[in-house]
Amino acid sequence: MKKTMKHTTPITKTLAAAGLAGILMISASGLPSAHVHAETKAAASTSQVTAPTVAPQRVTSKTLQSKEKWLETNIKIPVFQGLTDTKYQDQLNDIIESHASKDIAKWEQEATEAAANAQKNGYTMRPYQLTITYELTSDGKDDSLISLKVITEGIGMNNGDPRVDTYNFTNEAEAQRVTLEDLFGKDYKSIVDKAVKTAIAADQDHYFANEDGFQGIDAEQSFYVADGKAYIVFQKYSIAPGSTGIPEFAVKLPGKASDKKPAAAVLKPGAYYKDNNGKLMVQVSVLRQLQFNVKWSGKSKTTEISKGAVWSAVTLNKDAYTLGKMAPRSLGSAPVMKKGHVYVPLAFLTDVLNLKADQGKHGEITLTAGK
């Protein structure tokens, strides 16, 4: 992207003003496989979430496929339409499709070689998988800033190999690439570094330490913008073990009107699933985004949740949920541990903690304080 779309002018002063309004950290649990995609689509019909509102369509989807029989694909890439700078639009669409085509070719070759090796050595070959999805996180309504992330995950003989690519630019007559310096000013590095270090320190067990850990962002740091925050993205294994997934750290943009909005937490596809009981199961750690204290005890297999006078606790494999001194109640599924994350029924958040849940058009679930 850098060769054809160089940044030449800064974004508006509103975005460029320096200062840190606050920080928030999210640890993604990993990207969804095709199987999880099917579960999340089914989960979208639950009565516990509200149907999304229709937003102006900035992008359409294009499906790409592979003819290699040993590679199963689920690929939908974004195609921008209606941008003011049509030349930039065409270049960006070409770049995104080119990246996807190269990923397909790479995984086709690896799958073909693995199949030949399996036949030679007499063992069963399972098809490789390649999934590409995307999320338009900012559609240009605020300060003409458009932000997109494309998620690519290939699965072969070993664990999944995910990658997140981000694109940030202004929708103007001459579109311009947007950088973290545009958003936070000349001190952007110290502002973002401080935010990331603070968030990691609060959850150090999920991150590498010392020379293997976070050393600071660079000029080409990946990020995307959503709801008045810049989400700083690190690839899997770069600063944390695989169980942490793809770490994202959200830093509030200075001077944004969204600072006045009610606190909200976002569950992205991959951070929830539908279990065998038909219950939507979500990561309890999402409550940290709403300033809840979430504390895990490995000895008792219990997670304590507290915020002010609110207190609750959930225990693995026990379908008993309580708030304060109220009698325990069953919600149809017990808390479970998956890949280092504790999952609870969404009903625990909505019916017990009295939070409101709404589902967006890309599958994300937004939690806010109930009435």
Image: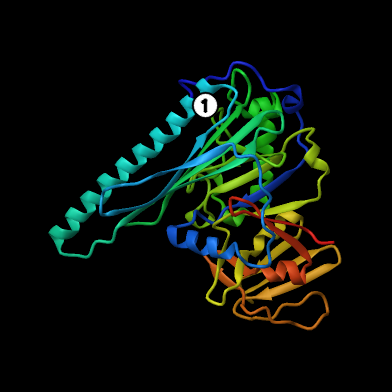
Q: Which residue is mark 1?
A: 89
Q: Residue at x 49, y 59 (%)?
A: 37
Q: Nearer the viewer, residue 95 or 291?
A: 95
Residue 181: x and y in percent read 65, 26
Residue 355: x and y in percent read 77, 63
Within 10 Å of the Cα at label 1, are there few (<14), some (14-19), or many (20+) other Cα atoms? some
| Amino acid under disc 1 | Gln
Where, by quadrant of the figure, is residue 105 drawn?
Answer: top left
**Residue 247 visible, this angle:** yes
Q: Residue at x 59, y 16 (%)?
A: 8
Left/right of residue 323 with respect to residue 330 in the rendered view: right
Q: Does 365 sit above or below residue 60?
A: below
Residue farthest to the bottom, as pictured: 327
Instruction: Name the image quarter holding the C terminus.
Output: bottom right
Left/right of residue 102 with respect to residue 323 in the rendered view: left
**Residue 216 visible, this angle:** no
